[in-house]
Image (cartoon, grey):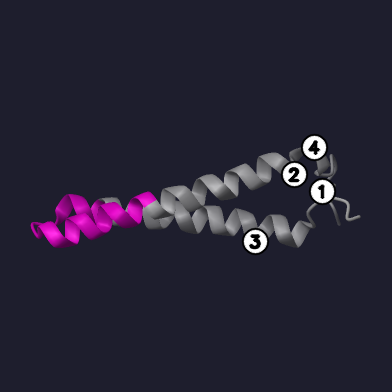
Amino acid sequence: MQSTQMQALTGKELEYIADSISNEDLLIKQLAATAGSTQNSTVNQICNQQIQSHTHHLGMLVQLLQQHQQYAPTQPQQ
């Protein structure tokens, strides 16, 4: 029988997740700016679809952090 207990994320894993959150946020902002400035309806539609996709990714990353929050160290790791 396998245990499904979560283990604490390492500092490196937390850094990767934080970077991914920043990247998803930047992509959402860039896509929104492009969608808002284009006159091409196809480009606008693609940008809006990608915004939805990246918003979903961002939500998944935040949810992952929330699930592991109770396992996070209370002091910075050196």
Cα–Cα span, label 4 and label 1: 10 Å
Q: Earlier in the sequence, mark 2 or mark 1?
A: 1
Disc 4 designates what residue? 70
Q: Please state which of the two labelled residues, at mark 3 or mark 2, is closer to the viewer.
A: 2
Cα–Cα span, label 3 and label 4: 19 Å
Q: Which element is circle 4 on?
A: helix
**Three-letter amino acid code of the residue under disc 1:** Met
Q: Which element is circle 3 on?
A: helix
- Give the overall secondary structure of the magenta segment: helix
Disc 3 designates what residue? 16
Q: Earlier in the sequence, mark 1 or mark 3?
A: 1
For the magenta stretch, what is the residue range?
33-52
Q: Please state which of the two labelled residues, at mark 1 or mark 3, is closer to the viewer.
A: 1
Q: Please state which of the two labelled residues, at mark 3 or mark 4, is closer to the viewer.
A: 4
Cα–Cα span, label 2 and label 1: 7 Å
Q: Which element is circle 1 on?
A: loop
**Three-letter amino acid code of the residue under disc 2:** His
- Residue 47 horizontal/vertical position (percent): 26, 57
Disc 1 designates what residue? 6
Q: Which element is circle 2 on?
A: helix
Dot 2 alpha-carbon crowd within 10 angstroms: few under 14, some 14 to 19, many 20 or more: some
Asked if the residues shown at circle 2 and circle 4 are in contact, with their CB atoms under 8 angstroms apart, the answer is yes
